[in-house]
Image (tube, rainbow, N blue to C red):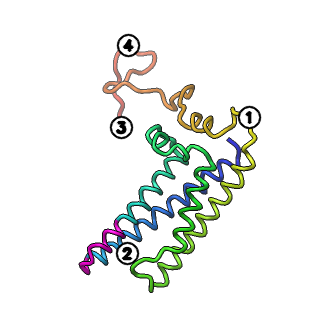
Amino acid sequence: MRATQAMLRLAGVGASLLIMLEGLVTLFGDFFRVLFEAELLLALHYFVEALFLLLGGWCLVCAEMWPRPWLMGNAPWLNKMSGRAIAYVAYGAWLIRREGYSSNASFLCILDILVGLSTLGVGAASAFYAYQLAGLPPALSEPALAREMQSTAGLAPAVAPQPPGPYFSPGTDGPSYMAG
């Protein structure tokens, strides 16, 4: 994996976590406030919006860090850097203009704009590098990286497994119990 790809993956994870933060802000800042005011249709709208942000952010985190078969089967465009770039641009553009129930609160509006701009930046950088890296040989393309991230073959365990119970010291015939 190239250093730029690793940096983009880390930036993507950061942007995805910010998207999930927006989902939590929507859930606790908008949904519960509207629900307690008994505006059920508006509460349902904010619940679906929070669910969309939370699940979308989680799927993007999984696509960046842990490519899983269930995710790649349902959202194959997340397997490529260009597909993730489109998702980041879409989330960023949506978050910049998102109007919450508490739209008069300047902190939440500024948070929406900052998260949207940072997500747009990650999407633009990902799109730029996806275009630049499009001519790589197949061994260095994104599906190979997904297999590389899932593969654990050839990795030796860091510590040899220890048998439970009495411990046998090397060079002795019987168990010696560890003091401790």
From the image, tell me which residue sits under label 3: 180
State the SS at label 4: loop
Q: Residue 66, how many percent across, how many down?
A: 51, 43
Say which mark, if any, is on residue 173.
4
Q: Secondary structure at mark 1?
A: loop
Range of residues picked out in magenta: 36-47
Residue 142 lies in the magenta stretch: no
Q: Is disc 1 surrounded by few (<14), some (14 to 19) or many (20+) residues within 10 Å?
A: few
Under tag 3, what secondary structure?
A: loop
Distance Cα–Cα, label 1 vs label 2: 48 Å
Q: Position of residue 64 (x, y in %)?
A: 55, 48
Of callouts 4 and 3, the N-terminal one:
4
> Residue at coordinates 70% horizontally, 47% vertically from top-left?
3
In the picture, the quarter occupied by the N terminus is top right
Of tags 3 and 2, the one toward the viewer is 2
Which residue is tagged 2?
29
Q: Is 28 or 134 nearer to us in this picture?
A: 134
Q: Residues within 10 Å of mark 4 (few under 14, many from 20)?
A: few
Measure the C-alpha gap from mark 1 to mark 3: 56 Å
Query: Label 1 is placed on what type of residue?
Result: Pro
Q: Could you tell whether 68 is left or right of 93 in the image?
A: left
Query: Closer to the observer: label 1 or label 4?
Result: 1
Residue type at tag 3:
Gly
First of labels 1, 4 by sequence position: 1
Task: Tell me how far mark 4 sits from mark 3, CA to CA.
Answer: 21 Å
Q: Quadrant of the C terminus?
A: top left
* Cα distance between the residues tagged 1 and 4: 58 Å
Relative side of 116 to 128, left or right: left
